[in-house]
Image (cartoon, grey):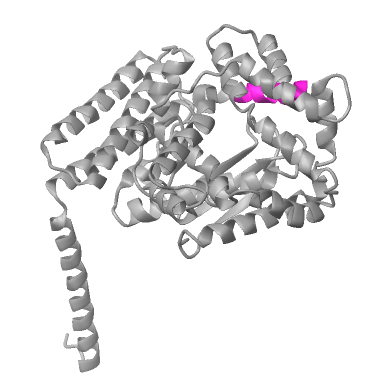
Amino acid sequence: MKLNNKKNIIFLLTTFILLLISCSERKEHEQLSDLELKMNSIAEGYVKLVLEVGKYDPLYVDAYYGPKEWIPSEKNLPFDSTVYNELNYTADSLFNKLDLLSEYKATELETLRFRYIYKQLLAVKTKIAVLNGTELPFDLESKAFYDATDTVQTEEDFQKVIDELDNILPGKGNIEERIVNFKKQFQIPEEKIKAVFDAAIKECRNRTSKYIHLPAGENFKVEYVENKPWGAYNWYKGNFFSVIQIATDFPVYIDGPVGLASHEGYPGHHVYNLLLEQKLVKDKGWIEYMIYPLYSPQSLIAEGTANYGVEILFPGDEKMKFEKEVLFPLAGLNTKQADLYYKVTSLLDKLDGTGVFAARNYLDGKWTKEETVKWLQKYQLETKERSEKFLSFIETYRSYLMTYDIGKKIISEYIERNGGTENNLAKSWEIFTRLISTPQTPSGLQD
């Protein structure tokens, strides 16, 4: 059948365009080095292995936005020695393939990628052993999963902080009761929580966007939930979108929303995940970042940068200033004792290490559940209900708790060593942005 001239021209143009696309794709594929092709193959094996391990622990795969056909249909399956042998064999095979790449001359970024996959695989192998019944002491578990261990503080360290609080808190008597009563005047009324959070998120995004180019269409949805072991959680869905859940079982205080908006959103988990997707998955085709196994070195980088982010977002007294000028009025709170409140919260921040201290003793079998709750009440200055909730987090996530404080310490020390200080905010943001958009490992940042 003969085509008329118009149809013939359209047909020829379409064919020509398709040929150009095909040649472009083939050329791009041919330009991939042998090292890149082998790394990509190992990356695919790693992603599929993590998905397989996730069949036996519903908490393990924190995020995945790769091919849907790779997702196993089975969930919450029982683990046995046959499964262990199969998964362990796969992990060892990937390690062997990685070892064979040592003969290649790699760029700095390729070296970072190699180290990242290697450390992530070590954590996967540890998870397989734990599923098979291996019990590790707290510090060994944290090193195997998160590529770092926490510094050990003492009860004396915490008691010094409590003594300082005792001196500045109003009233006399039981310090736990006094601090709970003092904080009540800074509790956000339930009906105003959303408005306060919305304002905090807007401010954090505006400040972040001055230093980090956010891709068009990036967004997240906030949900308010109850009966969770955590205070807030970011569920990254891919394509620059997150669902952030905020637990409202207990009182929300005025200093909380900015911290949560920064940690879970800007420049925290949401920005961390979308930059990795944009810079590594979409731009480079590094599919290992399509998946996020929770118990892995990646979590320490994620939590450390999220905790550090609020400091460069609101340097000095800027967080307090914004809260007093914007959030206090939105919440309908009086700023009369605000300065004292911030002195109290600053001291309470120094008690963050109490969580790891309690978790180590409880998980290593040195304390009972009752002893741990009582200790947490005493040294975290919280109610019994809050202490029980905190213990439920420890029981659920175990040594994950150490990723927050030690992660922030590793990140902040690395940034300061490389010239990022409060007096050089632009440099801090430059280094911070690089850390959340390139392959990084905790041990690599401490070398």
Location of residue 64 by image quarter:
top left
Towards the viewer: 241 or 417: 417
**Quarter the C terminus occupies:** top left
Q: Which residues are magenta?
A: 381-393
- Above or below, 27 against 102 in this view is below
Towards the viewer: 48 or 4: 48
Q: Residue at x 30, y 48 (%)?
A: 286
Q: Residue at x 40, y 36 (%)?
A: 72
Q: Residue at x 60, y 17 (%)?
A: 358
Residue 261 seen in the current view = yes
**Quarter the N terminus occupies:** bottom left
x and y percentages locating residue 231 in the rendered image: 65, 36
User: Would residue 408 appear left or right of 86 to someone viewing this image?
Assistant: right
Residue 243 seen in the current view = no
Towards the viewer: 428 or 142: 428
User: Would residue 32 appear left or right of 404 to someone viewing this image?
Assistant: left
x and y percentages locating residue 204 in the rendered image: 60, 55
x and y percentages locating residue 258 in the rendered image: 65, 48
Location of residue 371 by image quarter:
top right
How would you classify the magenta stretch by its main secondary structure? Answer: helix
Q: Name the residue at the left extreme.
A: 103
- Above or below, 137 against 442 in this view is above
x and y percentages locating residue 251 in the rendered image: 77, 37
- Above or below, 77 against 15 in this view is above
Q: Name the residue at the front extreme.
A: 423
User: How many marks do you count on the picture?
Assistant: 0
User: Would residue 17 appear left or right of 221 to someone viewing this image?
Assistant: left
Q: Is residue 191 magenta?
A: no
Location of residue 163 by image quarter:
top right
